Image (cartoon, rainbow, N blue to C red):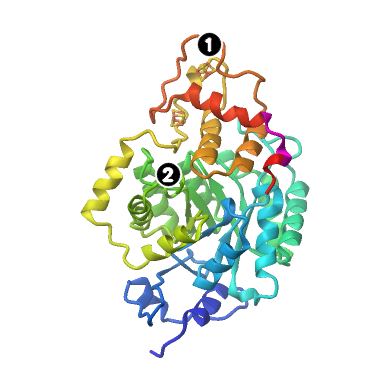
Amino acid sequence: MGKINRRDFFRSSVAGLGGFLVLPALDHRAEEGKGEKSKGQKKFLYRNLGKTGVKLPVITMGVMNSDNPNLIRAALEAGMYHLDTAHGYMRGKNEEVIGSVIKGRPRDSFFIATKIYLPRDESSGLPRETATEQFFLSRLDTSLKRLGLDHVDILYHHNVWTRDFAFYEPALKGLEKAKKDGKVRFAGITTHRNEPEVIEAAVESKFYEVIQIAYNHRQKHGPKIREALAKAGRAGLGVVAMKTLGGGQRNLEKAEARAALKWVLQDPNVNTIIAGFTTFDQLELDLSVMEDLTLKPAEKSLLERMKMTAGLYCQGCEQCLQSCRQNLPIPDLMRGYMYVYGYRNLIEAQDLLASLNLPSTLCQDCGSCRVKCASGFDVPARIRDVVRLREVPPEFLSA
Ligand code: SF4
Ligand code: SF4
């Protein structure tokens, strides 16, 4: 087989089906870890995104925490052509910055995913009246405008944690119409907790083509996720993994981050990781993971040791909910805490807090706290700490 350079390869791969180019067969070598590289080039490994007909590098860019156009540009130039964003990230600036970077580039040289979050009651998870198909589609139009595109590659129904919400009609109809109008290629769904239920719902729906899930070595329900992903794999769903470091890159040593990423990629049903790097060093590190995915015994031990610390990752297990006297949405508050200390993404944390309809005082009058966290978090201390962000004027945090 003749040689093909990486740029040509990803342009043909990213196009996939839907009237675009046919995939070259070379990828199989790369997929099996036998890809050749010339001097100065890094090895890339690719996997199929379910049965979409698209191949993606196994590590790509979750842009959520970065508004640095040079970093996004560097990721694209390196070959990480899948950029993952959301309508709400950085209050829209995330999509705008991506739009400025991709402007003028051939449309088949990048693959863009964004997400629309439908308003809901955060404690019950039930949709609010404003969560309509029209709302969904108008958000999509705004996202397309910010990105400067006439279509995105994946549009996700964002942050779903129940089966019922996975089947929520306005979201399904919105996705269907957007596809019909040529504004979206693939319909997706994302989940940050209760992942097995949502994955199974996505499989059952025969509608979603891609799922994005939180997946990392810290999850106590990891075996259940793995089982559900096997079903997703058999059904041909594309699987994108997020939160793969289990609490952000900021507090990790390089060896820890490398081991955590490799751990996720041991699951053959994961097609790509969206890594949330925010520095060029982290980008380099994430690229280097593709040199060799083998998880060595020392790395396995390292992961085991990491699991023995409380860390920043909330399991979303909801074991704390019943015992809280104020009925607080503790998993969301812990996620906000992780955004602050793991991601240094204060805007995302503040927006999350604002969406939770919290009382004005929290964790002040309970005497002793009855909540026992499965991860060993000092829940009230973390809550008191993170809610201080509510006092910061939003414009002080604007990117
Ligand atoms: S201290 Fe906070 S977390 Fe604990 S029971 Fe009271 S309100 Fe709930
Ligand atoms: S018990 Fe701890 S880990 Fe589980 S959802 Fe509550 S805060 Fe998160």
Q: Which residues are magenta?
A: 391-395
Q: Position of residue 381 (x, y in %)?
A: 49, 23
Which of the two discs, 1 and 2, labels the residue nearer the N terminus?
2
Q: Residue at x 67, y 42 (%)?
A: 397
Q: Which quarter of the figure has residue 271? A: bottom left
**Residue to which mark 1 is pinned:** 366
Q: Which mark is residue 381?
A: none
**Residue to which mark 2 is pinned:** 251
Position of 246 compared to 299: left or right? right
Residue closest to the far bottom: 2
Query: Magenta span has 219?
Result: no
Label 1 residue near ligand 1, CB within 8 Å: yes
Q: Is mark 1 in CB contact (under 8 Å) with mark 2?
A: no
219 and 89: which is toward the camera: 89
| Label 1 to label 2: alpha-carbon separation | 31 Å
Crowding around mark 1 (Cα neighbors within 10 Å: few <14, some 14 to 19, many 20+) is: few
Q: Which quarter of the figure has residue 33? A: bottom left
Q: Position of residue 242 (x, y in %)?
A: 48, 51
The answer to whether residue 121 is seen in the rendering is no
Which is more foreground, mark 1 or mark 2? 2
Above or below: residue 121 compared with residue 259: above
